[in-house]
Amino acid sequence: MAVSFDDERRVFFISTQNTSYQIRINEYGMLLHSYYGALVGKADMSYLIKEVDRGFSGNLYESADRRGLSPDTLPLEYGTYGSGDYRVSAIKTVLENGSRTLDLRYASHRIGHGRQAIRNLPYVRDDGRTDVLEIELEDRISGIRVILIYNVFEDKDIITRSARIINGSENSVSLIKAASMSMDIQNRHMDLIHFHGRHAMERITERSALGHGVYTVGSKRGQSSHHNNPFVILCDRHADENFGDCFGFMLMYSGNHAEEIELDQTGSVRVVSGISSEGFEWKLGAGESFDTPEVIMAYSGEGFNGLSHLYHRIIRENVCPARFRDKKRPVLINNWEGTYFDFTEKDILEIADAAADAGCGMLVLDDGWFGIRNNDKSGLGDWFVNKDKLPGGLKAIADHTGKLGMSFGLWIEPEMISEDSMLYREHPEWVLKDPDRDPVVARDQLVLNMSDHEVVDYLYGCISGILDSAEISYIKWDFNRSLANVYSSVTRADMQGEVSHSFVLGTYELLERIGAAYPDVMIEGCAGGGGRFDAGMLFYCPQIWCSDNTDAINRLIIQKGTSYGYPVCTMGSHVSISPNHQTGRETPLVTRAIVAMSGTFGYELDPRKLDDNEKNEIRQQIAIYERYCDLICNGRYYRLTGDEDEKCYTAWEIVAGDRSEALISIVVTDMKGNQELPFLKLKGLDPEASYVIDGVMSSAYELPGAAKDETEHADRVYMGKALMHGGLTLDPLYGQYPAMQLHLKNTVAKNDVMD
Ligand code: GLA
């Protein structure tokens, strides 16, 4: 059992394979956080908690003589508002008499095996080995109870946290903040790493030393957002990719969120993660309860690569729908950047022919196939085929791709509506809109009220109608604006603060119903690229379009940032044409393919416009991807380069689970004359095994007249330990954004080893 309770010392011990987490109940029923970090077994770590009398940090009434015992300075497991803890609170309530004070103390606990699903929310799926700790806290005056829920995935070094808030009083209570967790990490000088961005430039990694005060990362856009991913890392100042303590907190939620990090007067760091309290107010009638989304927590003493491996595994194995876990993802061709809205049925069929000829396995028809949709100003909501553009309907295309041996996928954007649409003319009351104001428009579209069951039912009918009309095996589920004027015409005035969260629940319900009715249809998430790239969406959609930016050089930053929390198999990544449509930059086709291959690979162009050389190159790329796709999707991913290297080049490596092979990729981003040599220290190989390079793909340009390195020979054998400790020096890579992909294969011919 990964969870135990020491009755005498009143300590909860949670242990995973490599980590320990401890909580202590003190003599006044306060729940204290004693430890999270490397495995310490049953050593009671509450000796780390010191009672220090600090001025202006008050005391419990019943322990007034123990001035060091203050809710303001002790490490707490769930911070409340109004009872003398002045740090960021995890929960705030308003009682019927107007009181905002809440004082939660231990009431009971339960230790068990097998986790429960969270009502109406995504969660980390049980694999039959989950242990559970539930600690019930109670405010004795109001009767409000909070159950802190810990699910322990012992062999995966993951602990999840969520909270169930119960109104045990006889009156109604307003919940105005309901975070999933809070935790106080004592006496640490820490850095915060988070992933900020914007449309077409998502999940840029930013690291800053924590200063005093509160640092909030979050979104109030109704979506997890391009701007701040609901994932943060706290780490020691010296931690890097391969060394040092780091803690991850990933909220499994797709709506408004906040990660608040406070460095307090004592030098401790509090982290609070959950639904954002901005605009949030949930009414709890007597006996009613509220469930928060789940936070996936991980600790690694082996730097960020170690932390990423824990997240990659849990997401691949316990978050994404299991039925797609080992299913090979087809190399797809998407027509968006190839045609935008301007296509006919003939165009699409020809694109399918050319793509099949190159070896693609699926055609995805993007925006513009329905309603009156020749640009982004109209048509959203009218989910029926535009017969002017596609006289044979979806069936004609699906039948055609079927004959070519390809599958067929389709773009939809269910939660949105254009004012210029039949649906809006029929149901103007179905949108989120303040009754007395003009709505904020974005991309000329409004947002449907997903908190209204009638809307969800209607959309279910539309989507199932589409899926029943043709052989469709994939949906790209888009979401192209942020929410504003969050007001629901079917909700009571005093419950409008619930709408943002109910909106997310409505979307989850729709995804759940579609997934249950059409289990073989794979849904790819998308929100103007990666505006909803979160573990909540991944529960329904095993992959998400990473960004609308397909520029290979920008993608290095976007995909690297994404890789801290999310595995390669979740990142939609395509080769588009050069010059790139988002940046105007020119890059070689090979470089674009090498970058797109560290994702769910595909093409986003019009294959009819390629010349014969390009077509041949693409054929080879697809063959290479097919050869390595199992390694790419299931291998261990390592970031090989840091800030200093990345002034010139970025490199990464994917190693097979059994360490029998590895794929190393490097892209040069800044070209210098007479350059320093690219140098990589490889990771994760078998130190005692020998490897050969048995595959090279490169876009490097050979300088005219440059002499060859005479010491180089292709059949060299390298020891794993040599490549990891000594590293690998590459020849200079010249050209415009040259890239190289090397495939290492374990050889049994150990005699040949040159060490
Ligand atoms: C979003 C998506 C794109 C494309 C367009 C279509 O921006 O991210 O890939 O589907 O919508 O309108």
Image (cartoon, rainbow, N blue to C red):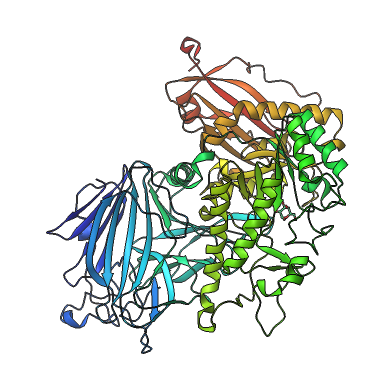
Query: Is residue 735 visible to the viewer in this orientation of the structure?
Result: no
Instruction: Give coordinates of residue 436: x percent, y percent.
Output: 68, 85
Quarter of the rendered image showing ligand 1: bottom right
Above or below for 556 versus 691: below
Q: Position of residue 423 (x, y in %)?
A: 74, 66
From the viewer's perspective, tell me whether residue 157 is left or right of residue 42.
right
Q: How many discs mark residues in the rendered view?
A: 0
Q: Which residue lies at the image location 84% right of the left edge and 51% below the top edge?
A: 387
Q: Residue furthest left?
A: 8
Position of 318 compared to 517: left or right? Answer: left
Q: Which residue is at 52% across, 20% downward? A: 691
Q: Position of residue 567 (x, y in %)?
A: 53, 43
Question: Relative to 143, is 701 above or below?
Answer: above
Q: Tell me which residue sits at (43%, 43%) in the image.
A: 306
Residue 208 left/right relative to 108: right
Quadrant of the image occupied by residue 586: top right
Which residue lies most toward the bottom here? 97
Q: Foreground: 460 or 306?
A: 460
Split into 4 quadrants, where in the image is the N terminus?
Answer: top left
Q: Nearer the viewer, residue 281 or 733?
A: 281
Given residues 231 and 43, the one toward you in this image is 231
Q: Note whether 633 is above or below 179 in the view shown.
A: above
Establish if 165 lies above or below 572.
below
Please tell me in which quadrant of the rendered image residue 631 appears: top right
x%, y% of residue 116?
Answer: 36, 54
Q: Is residue 193 visible?
A: yes
